[in-house]
């Protein structure tokens, strides 16, 4: 599924971004950030929360986080989310075969028990808005309470992001692909 165009809210040109975005890291100038820059009072606190989820203070490791995020992007059929996190997922240690297996889950992939539980939890949150008792209990054998909360909030954060990306029709950044055909 390709992103419908045109964008409903055009990203701000770089020269119209707040100074902290113009002078900050490149990630602050991707299309989602330039779109949200239309509402700086929303963007700043959201960006702080997103920073936690992306690993600055999250209790999950990068691989675990990216499994959750990629599966969330797949479940919501968000080309933008998928494309950005394929790149980030590779940097977190996922290989192309594993990334493809996230899209085709539960059909394939050589996942550890913990990784299967993360994929299952993501799907349960997508379908039921909660992790079921059996999956929760199984996850709790591997993760502490802080990590359990980070699992829920990672999927929730990226569900919100997918809603925003798809509703605003944020277009792919240059050089970033969308959802694969599976």
Image (cartoon, rainbow, N blue to C red):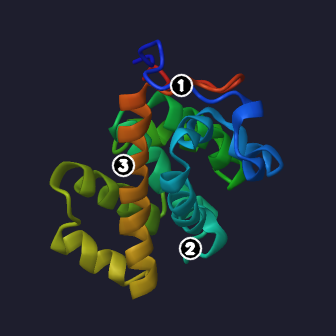
| First in sequence: mark 2 vs mark 1 | 2
Mark 1, residue position: 178
Q: Find residue 131 and report its horizontal and vertical position in percent.
A: 23, 66
Q: Residues within 10 Å of mark 1 (few under 14, many from 20)?
A: many
| Position of the N terminus by quadrant | top left
Q: Residue farthest to the right?
A: 23
Judge left or right: residue 177 versus residue 119: right
Residue underneath mark 3 = 159
Name the residue nearer the viewer: 156 or 23.
23
- Residue 140, placed above or below residue 118: below
- Residue closer to the observer: 126 or 136: 126
- Give the residue at x 56% y 37%: 32
Query: Which type of secondary structure does the marked residue at label 2 adopt?
Result: loop
Q: Determine the secondary structure under disc 1.
A: loop
Screen quadrant of the C terminus: top left
Horizontal arrangement in the rendering, residue 129 relative to residue 37 (left or right): left
Q: Earlier in the sequence, mark 3 or mark 2?
A: 2
Query: Which image quadrant is residue 173 in?
Result: top right
């Amino acid at each position: 599924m390709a992103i419908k165009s045109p964008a409903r809210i055009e990203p701000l040109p770089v020269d119209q971004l707040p100074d902290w975005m113009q002078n900050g890291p490149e990630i602050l100038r991707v299309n989602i950030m330039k779109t949200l820059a239309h509402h700086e009072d929303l963007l700043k606190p959201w960006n702080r929360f997103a920073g936690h989820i992306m690993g600055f203070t999250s209790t999950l490791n990068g691989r675990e986080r990216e499994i959750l995020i990629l599966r969330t992007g797949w479940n919501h059929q968000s080309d933008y989310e998928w494309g950005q996190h394929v790149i980030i997922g590779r940097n977190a240690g996922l290989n192309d075969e594993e990334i493809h297996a996230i899209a085709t889950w539960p059909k394939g992939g050589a996942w550890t028990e913990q990784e299967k539980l993360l994929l299952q939890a993501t799907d349960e949150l997508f379908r039921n808005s909660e992790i079921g008792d059996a999956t929760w209990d199984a996850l709790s054998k591997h993760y502490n309470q802080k990590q359990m909360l980070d699992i829920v909030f990672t999927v929730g954060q990226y569900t919100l992001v997918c809603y925003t990306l798809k509703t605003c029709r944020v277009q792919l950044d240059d050089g970033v692909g969308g959802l694969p055909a599976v």
